Image (cartoon, rainbow, N blue to C red):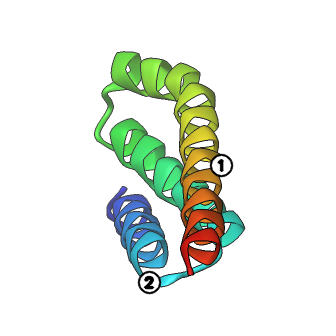
């Protein structure tokens, strides 16, 4: 059981640092999924199965929201770049 919790913590740390340090949005989504997998594994390892079931059901929704946020941020950045070029 200790080995499983070590793997879960490692997955969460790798996912968190990946989200922070990687620049490409698709890489961030992959790291976010890795963080989610580590979180669900940690919850299962500590036998909170009702919380694990909710997390497993909520993970796809949170991933979709994360992708929508990335798309919106990219759209705002493009609009700022286009308006900055028009003002010069």
Question: In the drawing, does residue 45 fall left or right of residue 27?
Answer: left
Residue 15 image offset from top left, x and y in percent: 47, 68
Residue 11 image offset from top left, x and y in percent: 47, 67
Q: Residue at left 39%, top 68%?
A: 16
Question: In the drawing, does residue 9 fall left or right of residue 37?
Answer: left
Q: Quadrant of the C terminus?
A: bottom right
Q: Residue at left 54%, top 63%?
A: 80
Q: Residue at left 35%, top 22%?
A: 51
Between discs 2 and 1, the one toward the N terminus: 2
Q: Name the residue under label 2.
A: 21
Indicate the quadrant where residue 54 lies.
top left
Q: In which quarter of the image is the N terminus?
A: bottom left
**Of discs 2 and 1, which sits in the foreground?**
1
Residue 70 image offset from top left, x and y in percent: 58, 52
* Dot 1 crowding, Cα within 10 Å, few <14, some 14–19, many 20+: few
> Which label sits on residue 71?
1
Residue 6 image offset from top left, x and y in percent: 36, 69
| 28 lies above or below 49 | below
| 64 lies above or below 31 | above
Question: In the drawing, does residue 53 fall left or right of residue 74?
Answer: left
> Which label sits on residue 2?
none
Label 1 sits on a secondary structure element that is helix
């Amino acid at each position: 059981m200790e080995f499983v919790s070590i793997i879960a913590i490692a997955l969460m740390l790798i996912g968190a640092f990946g989200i922070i340090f990687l620049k490409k949005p698709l890489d961030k989504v992959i790291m976010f999924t890795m963080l989610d997998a580590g979180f669900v594994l940690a919850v299962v390892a500590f036998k909170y199965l009702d919380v694990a079931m909710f997390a497993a059901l909520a993970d796809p929704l949170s991933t979709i929201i994360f992708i929508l946020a990335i798309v919106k941020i990219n759209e705002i950045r493009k609009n700022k770049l286009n308006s900055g070029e028009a003002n010069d």
